[in-house]
Image: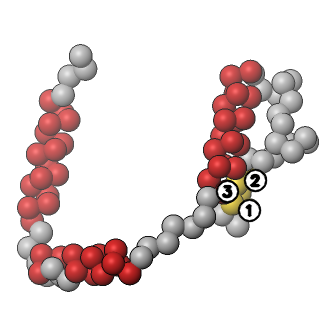
Amino acid sequence: MSSRSGVLQPVGDRGGAVSSSIVDRDTQDALRLLEGVVRSVLSHETVQLDDEYLRLIAAVEALPENQNGADKSHTMRHLRELQDVFRCARRL
């Protein structure tokens, strides 16, 4: 697949088909799946946000704790705690 102006396009001499002499069967299957995903994504309409949702976003952004200069030091503490959890995690 290649990208032109942000849109993925299938590549190959047969509209995206990949010759079996170039890649193995697993790779061909993976490429076929990816081409299907790209077609599916491109077929969906753009998400439209309604006015109520945009008003709610504006209200959250206007909260005092979301303003420049507000104390956000707790976020670093939470990040360190989360890193500690993952550092101590063991595979079961």
Determine whether, in the image, residue 72 is placed left or right of residue 52.
left
**N-terminal-most mark, 2 or 3:** 2
To which residue does mark 2 refer? Answer: 9
- Residue 65 visible within the image: yes
Q: Position of residue 72 (x, y in %)?
A: 12, 69
**N-terminal-most mark, 2 or 1:** 1
Amino acid type at mark 2 = Gln
Determine whether, in the image, residue 79 is placed left or right of residue 50.
left
Q: How far is disc 2 from disc 1 in space, using C-alphas?
A: 7 Å
Determine whether, in the image, residue 49 is placed left or right of residue 16.
left
Q: Position of residue 22 (x, y in %)?
A: 82, 28
Amino acid type at mark 3 = Ser
Labels 1 and 3 touching (C-beta < 8 A) = no
To which residue does mark 3 refer? Answer: 43
Which residue is found at the position 9% from the left and 65% from the top? 73
Q: Nearer the viewer, mark 1 or mark 3?
A: 3
Q: Quadrant of the C terminus?
A: top left
Amino acid type at mark 1 = Arg
**Secondary structure beneath label 2:** strand
Q: Nearer the viewer, residue 68 or 44?
A: 44
**N-terminal-most mark, 1 or 3:** 1
